[in-house]
């Protein structure tokens, strides 16, 4: 009888799918109608915001970021050409997958996933976690340790999100810290640190962007970038907030409070997290807390950081070198055979497939938004209201919304900077303050958006779904954004 009930109950979700499918089809019909009304060569204006708004609504209802992004991409393509969606969809996917940045992201994340699997299966990650457990004596210390490790791993936010989470989550689990809070501390440390420290992938990219847009002379981009670091307000505020949360000065509220209560009841991993392959990789071996085992974890991590710096802040080259050395190191010691290590690397790639698919879908949405002219419209709409005093605050607010809606913390600024800079020069605004506002907006959007690469990787590394992470983190991110906006208004009038 119980089996019959289970079989019959399995049909219930199918009936609940029908209303959602009808609503989705009705929305697609609306986008088709908008395409019919649009004149060829006309700008889309405010209508360009609709696909991104559609994505946010679908994601909040379904809690499935990849599916939400895909529906938003299709909706945008219907607007652009309602007579043919398949070919533009294939062309957009091909263009994104052929982009050098995406190739870099896929290789870095996949290889990082493989490295983490090797660290877990060799027992070396367990050794380091065992050593940490011996040093950490309280729940508060486990959170502060996570924060401090995040401060040290400032080279790249991908490295921060994946490496820090893998090294501390066994410790935080033992003190009943929710994976959502772990993801928040990691994510809110990663992006802010990457903009505040001039030796990072973000600093290299944006200093080059400053030179390309004549904001700095050739070879002087990094100097201009450094001059703006004191004005990267959101980075400083976000770090202060996450420190206060880890210290329990700022308590849990909103969705985070529910997540923490669940963890205190003995369930740190949320129900909607399905990526348990990585969770099962760790081995409980004798001697896992030994000094040798701990060093077998620390040496690859240090090598990864220093080799990335050596190769001009290129994480891909750093992780390739680190994997090669780690494979030899573990083989010589008899920890894992070559076959086991290569299988582990492929399994690491497999674990990262869903997060990577979400990142790819996010880049596809950005491509569609670029064709609709969303970024140009948003920046242009507020440009007439910008004064020298209010420009930094408006730049932060507008670009934070743009990055949040597109998940493109880097790509959006290629479009925005040529628009913002002439306005700043025309009103004689303080340029380091404007650059600080731009970088602050980039940092906020990077870890507040539920489908950004930073959010997805922080969630995957910590062991929770991107939506659970984004929803629990949102109140703290908004707190930092409100404080930053007020600070930019005050600085705009003071400087």
Image (cartoon, rainbow, N blue to C red):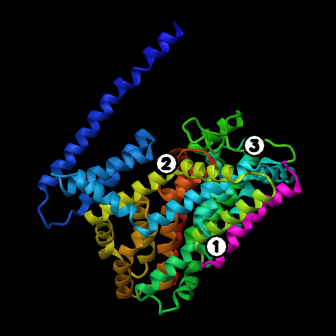
- The secondary element bearing badge 2 is classed as helix
Magenta span: chief secondary structure: helix
What residue is shown at x 54% (from left), y 37% (from top)? 272
* Label located before the other in sequence (3 or 2): 3
Q: CA distance from mark 3 to mark 1?
A: 29 Å
Q: Is residue 254 left or right of residue 382?
A: right
Crowd band around label 2 with a 10 angstrom C-alpha radius: few (<14), some (14–19), many (20+)? some
- The secondary element bearing badge 1 is classed as helix
Q: Which residue is mark 3?
A: 283
Which tag is nearer the camera, tag 3 or tag 2?
A: 3
* Label located before the other in sequence (1 or 2): 1
Please provide percent x and percent y for residue 181. 64, 49
Q: CA distance from mark 1 to mark 2?
A: 26 Å
Please provide percent x and percent y for residue 446. 50, 62
Answer whether residue 277 is magenta in the image. Answer: no
Q: Which residue is mark 2?
A: 354
- The secondary element bearing badge 3 is classed as loop
What residue is shown at x 57% (from left), y 85% (from top)? 227
What segment carries the magenta color? 288-312
Q: CA distance from mark 3 to mark 2?
A: 24 Å
Please provide percent x and percent y for residue 459. 57, 50
Camera-side residue of 25 and 354? 354
Q: Residue furthest top?
A: 1
Q: Which residue is mark 1?
A: 308
């Amino acid at each position: 009888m119980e089996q019959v009930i289970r079989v019959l109950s399995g049909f219930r979700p199918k009936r609940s799918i029908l209303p959602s499918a009808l609503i989705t089809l009705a929305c697609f019909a609306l986008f088709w109608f908008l395409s019919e009304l649009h004149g060829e060569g006309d700008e889309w204006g405010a209508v360009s915001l609709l696909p991104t708004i559609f994505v946010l609504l679908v994601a909040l209802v379904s809690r499935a970021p990849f599916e939400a992004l895909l529906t938003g991409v299709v909706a945008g393509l219907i607007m652009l050409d309602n007579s043919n969606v398949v070919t533009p969809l294939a062309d957009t996917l091909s263009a994104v997958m052929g982009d050098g940045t995406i190739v870099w992201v896929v290789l870095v994340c996949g290889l990082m996933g493989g490295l983490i699997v090797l660290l877990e299966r060799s027992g070396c990650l367990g050794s380091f976690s065992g050593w940490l457990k011996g040093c950490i004596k309280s729940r508060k210390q486990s959170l502060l340790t996570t924060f401090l490790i995040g401060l040290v791993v400032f080279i790249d936010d991908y490295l921060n999100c994946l490496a820090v989470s893998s090294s501390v989550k066994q410790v935080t689990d033992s003190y009943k810290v929710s994976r959502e809070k772990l993801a928040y501390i990691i994510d809110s440390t990663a992006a802010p640190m990457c903009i505040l420290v001039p030796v990072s992938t973000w600093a290299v990219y944006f200093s080059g962007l400053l030179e390309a847009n004549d904001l700095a002379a050739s070879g002087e981009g990094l100097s201009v970038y450094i001059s703006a670091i004191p004005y990267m307000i959101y980075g400083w505020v976000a770090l202060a907030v996450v420190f206060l949360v880890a210290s329990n000065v700022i308590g849990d509220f909103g969705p985070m409070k529910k997540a923490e209560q669940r963890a205190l009841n003995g369930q740190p991993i949320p129900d909607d997290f399905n990526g348990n392959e990585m969770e099962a990789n760790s081995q409980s071996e004798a001697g896992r807390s030994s000094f040798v085992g701990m060093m077998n974890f620390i040496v690859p991590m240090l090598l990864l950081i220093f080799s990335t710096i050596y190769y001009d802040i290129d994480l891909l080259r750093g992780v390739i070198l680190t994997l090669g050395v780690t494979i030899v190191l573990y083989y010589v010691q008899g920890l894992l055979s070559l076959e086991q290590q290569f299988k582990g690397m492929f399994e690491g790639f497999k674990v990262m497939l869903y997060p990577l698919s979400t990142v790819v879908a996010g880049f596809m949405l950005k491509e569609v938004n670029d064709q609709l002219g969303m970024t140009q419209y948003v920046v242009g709409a507020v440009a007439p209201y910008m004064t020298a005093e209010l420009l930094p605050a408006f730049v932060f607010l507008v670009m934070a919304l743009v990055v949040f809606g597109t998940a493109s913390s880097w790509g959006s600024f290629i479009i925005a900077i040529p628009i913002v800079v002439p306005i700043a020069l025309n009103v004689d605004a303080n340029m380091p303050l404007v650059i600080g506002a731009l970088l602050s907006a980039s940092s906020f959007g990077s870890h507040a958006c539920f489908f950004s690469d930073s959010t997805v990787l922080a969630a995957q590394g910590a062991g929770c779904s991107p939506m659970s992470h984004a929803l629990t983190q949102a109140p703290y991110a908004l707190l930092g954004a409100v404080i930053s906006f007020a600070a930019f208004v005050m600085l705009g009038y003071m400087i």
